[in-house]
Image (cartoon, rainbow, N blue to C red):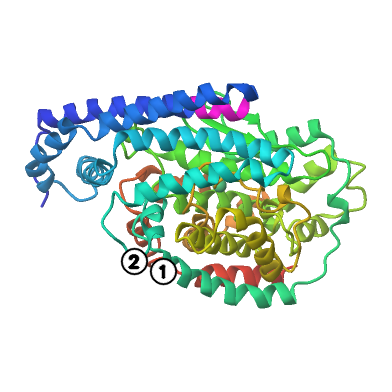
Amino acid sequence: MTITVDAPPQLQRLKQALGVVADLRHTESVAGWDSRVFMPVRGAPARADVSATLGRLAHEQFVSDDVGELLEELRPYEENLDYDSDDASLIRVTRRDWERNRRVPSDLVGEMWRAAALGVAAWDQAKAVSDYSLLAPHLERQLELRHRYVECFPPTDEKYDVLLEDYEPGMTAAQVAAIFDDVKAATLPLIEAAPEIDDSFLSGDFDIAAQEEACRRILAVFGFDEAGWRLDETPHPFEANPGVGDIRLTTHYRGDDLHSLFSTMHEFGHGVYEWGVDTALARTPLETGTSSAMHESQSRTWENLVGRSRAFWRFFYPTMRELFPQRLDGVDAQAFYRAVNRVRRTAIRIDSDEVTYNLHIILRFELERDLLDGRLAVADVPAAWNAATREYLGVDPVEDAHGVLQDMHWGAGLVGYFPTYSLGNVLSVQIWERARAEFDDLDAQMERGEFGELREWLREHVYRHGRKFTPEELIERVTGRPIDAGPYVRYLQEKLSTL
Ligand code: ZN
């Protein structure tokens, strides 16, 4: 039996303190979004100062003695609450965050924010001229900061575990490696056996205004609402949400293919997760998705499970024919569906298909583990990258811009982030199977262009909880099982059999 207890005044004081922290983080989010969408190149050093200051201030406010004392005083109240109530979750998760963040000096946090802003700006230039030497000193700096960060925590099996904890709480590098072994063992034969598919009609001149129209129409049926969402253009798409009612997607249009459609659907998945978090959790540590992998599971749901499905293209392909009459002349919906699912070895992660994608991630995971443990020197990364690409994907990157410089993550200091992409793929199908079991006409709904019921189901079971539950708890609640590569592997096998 639950006894209802009036919330003590400390709860309100805690929420006020956390609201200030959230506002600082939201401000940093706008500054970061602007730096990648509108800011002129030379603004980078000044913006890095802004990020460092906001990051440091948010950290100082959060790890204050006041917050710690309020959390202590709230223990008796917490003990009388249900585990999954908003208040108990707020106190529990905030205490976990507080204890973890309290170990790290605010100055180090500020330096990490500064290094991220400068590193991304340097990576941008390095990629533009395909010159790794422009990124290398920033990568050295990022590793130095990561080592200092790791030293703030008690020893773990490997340093990587400390970094991974920030993106995927509860997961260790050894667990990730075990899941990746399963995925790798299952996908290598699939790649070998994949059918030859003609996708030549997907390269060539694709009018950008028509691509923009296609993206807008897809977003409209998925649930994009002009009053609460934005879509802007940037070279490397991402999603930002600086507060309730403010979801910002970005995409990238290339004149010679249709990549923008999938990138837009991907970022929609991130946006709709944030959109769906219960507004009662706003301005608290619970107001966002529970982990990077769970977030990625939703971007991959909307990009792949919906956006690369036969049902979706039965619905949307007539619009494509209307928008690109010459380019798609003589191509039917099934041919288009097969082409957007073609399995192909490429050196570029974001151009890869669902099957080979994970090999790109496994390669990065192994390299960054080696980098962090000092088995790989920063100077040797391009050679190691190229060798691994040859070994895993059987292709040679043409130049560093499309090899080691293709992703911004390491420039931004995001070491430990990459594995969450493949973990997200795995989780996405576990959740999807559950949704399919609950409404058996999902394909028929998608063929009619109806996505509202799916979106609401995901909101009810996943999105609305924000960070109330750990990723482990959430996947158990939704599917009754822990993370498991089995459903994902079966999905890939079935998918390939339809091509
Ligand atoms: Zn993503």
Which residue is at 84% across, 35% downward? 207
Disc 1: which residue: 174
Is most of the magenta stretch helix, strand or loop? helix
Which residue is at 27% across, 46% downward? 100
Q: Is residue 17 above or below residue 134?
A: above
Residues shaded magenta:
31-37
Ligand 1 within 8 Å, label 1 CB: no
> Marks 2 and 1, Cα distance to the nearest angstrom?
9 Å
User: Sequence order check: which comes first, mark 2 or mark 1?
Assistant: 2
The amino acid at mark 2 is: Asp
Query: Nearest the camera: 62 or 277?
Result: 62
Q: Is residue 327 left or right of residue 495?
A: right
The amino acid at mark 1 is: Ala
Q: Quadrant of residue 480?
A: bottom left
Q: Is residue 230 above or below residue 373?
A: above
Q: Is residue 35 above or below residue 78?
A: above
* x and y, in percent, of residue 488 in the image: 55, 67
**Are circles 2 and 1 on residues that touch, CB within 8 Å?**
yes
Disc 2: which residue: 157
Q: Is residue 310 above or below residue 283?
A: below
Judged from the image, the secondary structure of the residue bearing numbered disc 2 is loop
Residue 26 is marked as none
Counting other residues with Cα less than 10 Å from the Cα at mark 1, is it few (<14), some (14-19), or many (20 or more)? few
* x and y, in percent, of residue 431 in the image: 47, 59
Q: Quadrant of residue 73?
A: top left
